[in-house]
Image (cartoon, coloured by chain):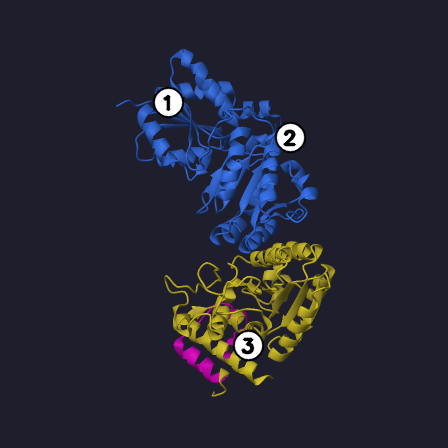
Chain colours: A yellow, B blue
Amino acid sequence: MDPELKRVCRDIRCDIMTCIGHLGVGHVGGCLSLVELLAVLYFGEMNIDPADPKKKGRDRLVCSKGHAGPAVYATLANRGYFGKEELLTLNQGGTHLPSHCDMNLTVGIDMTTGSLGQGFSCAVGAALGAKLEKDGARIFTIIGDGESQEGQIWEAAMFAAAKKLDNLIGFTDYNKLQIDDTVAKVNDIAPLAEKWRAFGWNVLEVTNGNDADAVRQAVRTAKENRGSGRPTMVILHTVKGCGVSFIEAMGAANHNTNLSEEDARRAIAEIRGEA
Amino acid sequence: MEMRAVYAACLAELMEKDKHVVVLDADLAKASGTRALYERFPEQMFDCGVAEQNMASIAAGLASYGFKPYIESFTPFATRRICDQIAISIAYAKQNVKIVGTDPGISAELNGGTHMSMEDIGVIRSIPGMVIFEPVDAVQLRAAMPVLYEYEGCVYIRLFRKELPTVFPEEYRFDLFRADMLREGCDVSIFVSGMLTADTLSAAEELAEEGISCEVINVHTIKPVDRETVLRSAAKTRAVLTVENHNVIGGLHSAILETLATERIPVSALGIPDRFGEVGKLPYLREVMGLTKEDIKEAIRKAALLAKKE
């Protein structure tokens, strides 16, 4: 693994644990599963400038699974959008870092998300906007596997393909777990790749979506799909709670869970390889 | 001229002037009167198909990119069906999106109960930051369209799409946040919105012969309601009646009642009596809902009797 990318992933993971541990509760599982993707996007693959977060023609990320806000914030802080000390204000009254992403509160957040399914349509709208503006921007968007049960996801999927939005790259955080149980048991979304193909998308699958090198390779391939006339969905087979064994072991219960500062310290020791 | 034709002509002017004005449909462009604009503005008109939720959030995405989207559907599908998308993608995210609902209330006529929104104003009114505008005639709509375009924020436009009698003179000047005095009087204040305005005005004129002096005020903007005008008129007449093509719960009546809640002034209601719609032509529907001109006159008489003069 690229050592620099590995270091970034480790730092983001630790910062997620620190801020959720400081607060005492949060969407731990679905934050940890996204770390490699966020690191790849913000540290190399996205055309962005932390010093000019509203730059015209920049690439955008819409984290439609808005509850992964803390993972995005940790990534933005590591990328220099704001100071890391701000991460400790997560979900405190008056914070700029609410549990779910808010474009009006947080520097670097491109879309307000949290009501599942909607952010994905918003990303499609932004991709259409970028096409109309001919500014060369790419729109990246992340949806959850549970979120894929929302009908609106498939309305947007159909529209994006019909409008040939090949500047749109979606990611499914396919960690197989949702709040109530496994995705397969609650309301199975499989076969997922076939569904996206049937909706007219290019589909890439990453067997280990927590392998940063593999994710980066997939993102680069997806970017090359511009000109194909089709949006691309990258299905990332991830582990919910990835990187912290006791959180992984919680299974579906790690979606939104209590986390003490002591738990966070233990997690960070493991992430840093000190445990 | 049909209201939708006026609306479409105004949109065309805006699209001509500003390439960032875009229009999104959910397979009802014909009903909204905008179908012909697709050929003229192929880069600004988008039909999302029968998928209103997606349409609303796509509009939010376009707005985040600096566009000024108008989304269109029948009132029930432009409001209650996509309430969460309006609340979160659009209003909470502070996106400059205009929502255009056609065929409000009983004006859906032969489409019947499934297509009749008796609750759309209530649904939208309870979402923070929303502006709700319901035009009375072609003159007002034409005057309002450029003002709504200039207004940076989310507006719900409740649009009767067929022809309506003209209420306002050609020289009419529109203020989005100011209700319009149509007739001054001293016995009862009548606050009216939308398609019932012309008949309410006519009813008020006829009642002058019975010695009832009616003040008629068109509340074209139901949220935020023009408190100053409402309070001033009610304080003068000490009796109030609201007239609307909407459930008496949640719409204009509620907005006026809330405004006058601490004023000890009786506020009577004429509107849809908390029931669903049904199929029929307007004259039939106005009959069954109790919204004929005679019903309006009777409601005014009763409201005037309740006046508590100081």
Measure the C-alpha gap from mark 3 to mark 1: 69 Å
**Magenta-drawn stretch contains A150:** no
Measure the C-alpha gap from mark 2 to mark 3: 57 Å
Q: Residue at x 53, y 78 (%)?
A: A9
Say if residue A211 shows up in the picture.
no
Q: Amino acid at mark 2?
A: Leu
Q: Is residue A147 left or right of residue A50?
A: right
Q: Amino acid at mark 3?
A: Cys
For label 1, count other residues whose C-alpha is less than 10 Å away and answer few (under 14), some (14-19) or many (20+): many
Q: How many marks?
A: 3
- Residue receiving disc 2: B110
Q: Which residues are magenta?
A: A241-270
Residue B100 image point, x, y percent: 56, 40
For label 3, count other residues whose C-alpha is less than 10 Å away and answer few (under 14), some (14-19) or many (20+): many
Q: Nearer the viewer, mark 3 or mark 1?
A: 1
Residue B80 image point, x, y percent: 54, 43
- Residue receiving disc 1: B188
- Residue receiving disc 3: A242
Do the dots labelled 3 and 1 sit on one chain?
Answer: no
Residue B39 image point, x, y percent: 70, 43
Q: Chain of mark 1?
A: B
Q: Is residue B122 left or right of residue B163?
A: left
Relative to A158, does residue A243 appear above or below in the rendering? below
SS assignment for the magenta stretch, majority: helix
